[in-house]
Image: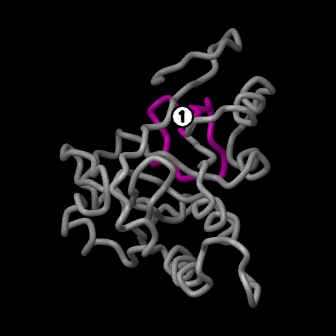
Amino acid sequence: MHTYPDQMTSMVDYYDLKKAIDVLENDGLILYPTDTNWSIGCDASSEVAVTRAYHLKNRPYELPMTVLVDSIEMLRDYVEHLHPRIETLLSFHLRPLTIVYDKATSLPERLTAADGSIAIRIPQDDFCRELIQRFGRPIVASSANIEGASRPQHFGEISSEIIQGVDLVMPYRRADRSIGEPSVVARLSDKAELIFIRE
């Protein structure tokens, strides 16, 4: 049972937030801006919702999707092991940072790579973090495009097929034409050394 304050101190509108959470709780899809680009989102713990996201994007199941959590505390609930080196990196990194963890827990197998690894990010975006925090579970963040098409640089480049295929389009930053940076992607080697897959 989610509770909402009478007055919210953040940028997130009470009614928009409630609508988004209602959609997520019913295995629905949302279209929302993240700290990198516009994304298709859903309850990352629901296999039904994750499958819907794959179908909308026409994305092969062999390609994993990124998951967003609101904090290091939530992250611990969904990865098998959080190395202190990764925790330190997450605390001080200034750009959006996606970490590939060796093993996921409590998440659908469909979200993971063939080796069982999972890509998770703590977004550097107030709206995303508050949405995830109030929803109480991780949310998928997969770029708002059909597989093989260019990733939209802003809301105006998102195809009608994607917009019509989700259950809710969030109103935030639709007029923003700035180009978000892709996240840095890193993982820890077997020797506990940081490997940057994308910088």
**Picture coordinates of residue 96 (x, y %)?**
55, 39
Q: Residue furthest top?
A: 191
Find residue 13 and report its image quarter: bottom right
Q: Nearer the viewer, residue 142 or 9?
A: 9
**Picture coordinates of residue 57 (x, y %)?**
27, 56
Q: Secondary structure at mark 1?
A: loop
Q: Nearer the viewer, residue 40 or 8?
A: 8
Q: Residue at x 59, y 33 (%)?
A: 99
Residue 108 included in the magenta stretch of the image = yes
Q: To which residue does mark 1 refer?
A: 116
Give the amino acid at mark 1. Gly
Find residue 162 and report its image quarter: bottom left
Q: Is residue 60 above or below residue 188?
A: below
Q: Is residue 183 left or right of residue 14?
A: left
Q: Is residue 131 left or right of residue 145?
A: right
**Picture coordinates of residue 121 (x, y %)?**
59, 43
Q: Residue furthest bottom?
A: 6
Q: Is residue 94 above or below residue 168?
A: above
The answer to whether residue 1 of the structure is visible from this angle is no
**Figure quadrant of the N terminus:** bottom right
Q: Nearer the viewer, residue 42 or 8?
A: 8
Find residue 76 and report its image quarter: top right
Q: Is residue 76 above or below residue 144?
A: above
Q: Nearer the viewer, residue 163 or 50?
A: 163
The residue carrying pointer 1 sits among few (fewer than 14), some (14 to 19) or many (20 or more) residues within 10 Å by Cα, namely some
The answer to whether residue 38 of the structure is visible from this angle is yes
Q: Residue at x 71, y 14 (%)?
A: 192
Q: Is residue 119 above or below residue 69?
A: above
The magenta-colored residue range is 98-119
Q: Residue at x 28, y 45 (%)?
A: 60
Q: Residue at x 36, y 40 (%)?
A: 63
